[in-house]
Image (cartoon, rainbow, N blue to C red):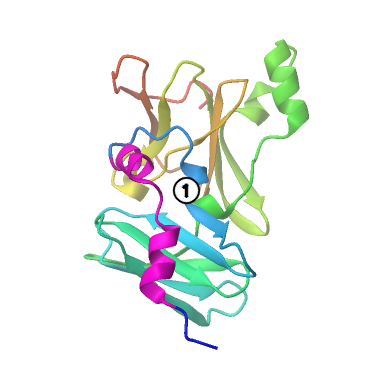
Amino acid sequence: MNAPDKAGTRHRAIPAAVDLDALIRAEHRDPFSILGPHGDGGSGQYVCAYLPAALSVRLLARDDGRELGEMEMSEVPGFFVGHLEHPQPYLLKINWAGGEQITEDPYSFGPLLGEMDLYLFAEGNHRDLSSCLGAQVTSVDGVDGVRFAVWAPNARRVSVVGSFNSWDGRRHPMRMRHPTGVWEIFVPRLQPGEVYKYEILGAHGILPLKSDPMA
């Protein structure tokens, strides 16, 4: 069997130019559709990560920390693509100018809020919004971190920002849960008490930083 063409593999994993452009400009409405793990059409999966200012990224096995391979930077600075022969939980080993970071991929986690929560919220009958929205210290798939959720039905994009991502709205754009207008993301390994705000791209391009009304 011929060895796989790594350049061809990476090229097939790179999103369309319109998606990349929206991601770079922090205007993509569905970052989970292009970031994180996605099937390769066979038995493996691609992993895509957008980490502006990262120097290099490697994939590690989550269970024992063994190295699975290096992610290659595309022509877009900060956009990295890797490949796993078989789907498995993984870690990102990120090399920044100021040091090294090992973390789970926020875009490897599925939807967070339950369908009943969303249904009750949409009906206006949810009686415990404090457990649904805001910043919730929790564990997802055995990983500790903080789940963020905010209602912004007219937003084009919402990101959670703080010192943990250098207040860069490109780092943690959130998932919108249609049709409720709730945006959510789980940030693994984040500690309780971190200062954060929401960067909200409005319908007219206004980009304010807003405090969490549920904080």
Tell me the amino acid under the disc marked 1. Answer: Ile
Question: Residue at label 1?
Answer: 34
Q: Secondary structure at mark 1?
A: loop
Q: Which residues are magenta?
A: 5-24
Asked if residue 214 is positioned above or below residue 35 in the image, the reply reads: above
- Residue 83 locus on image (x, y percent): 49, 70
- Residue 112 locus on image (x, y percent): 65, 40
Left or right: where 58 falls relative to 109:
left
Left or right: where 60 falls relative to 177:
left
Asked if residue 122 is positioned above or below residue 68 in the image, the reply reads: above
Q: Is residue 80 visible to us here?
A: yes
- Total marks shown come to 1
Task: Identify the residue shown where x is 56% and y is 54%.
Answer: 108
Magenta stretch containing residue 3, yes or no?
no
Single out the residue that lies furthest toward the right: 116
Task: Identify the residue shown where x is 29% and y is 42%.
Answer: 24
Looking at the rendering, which quadrant does residue 21 occupy?
top left
Asked if residue 85 is positioned above or below residue 194 in the image, the reply reads: below
Task: Identify the residue shown where x is 36% and y is 49%.
Answer: 164
Residue nearer the viewer, 90 or 14: 14
Looking at the rendering, which quadrant does residue 48 occupy?
bottom left
- Residue 41 locus on image (x, y percent): 60, 62
The kind of secondary structure the magenta stretch mainly shows is helix
Magenta stretch containing residue 14, yes or no?
yes
Single out the residue that lies furthest toward the left: 97
Task: Identify the residue shown where x is 28% and y is 47%.
Answer: 166
Q: Is residue 188 visible to us here?
A: no
Residue nearer the viewer, 200 or 22: 22
Left or right: where 146 falls relative to 18:
right
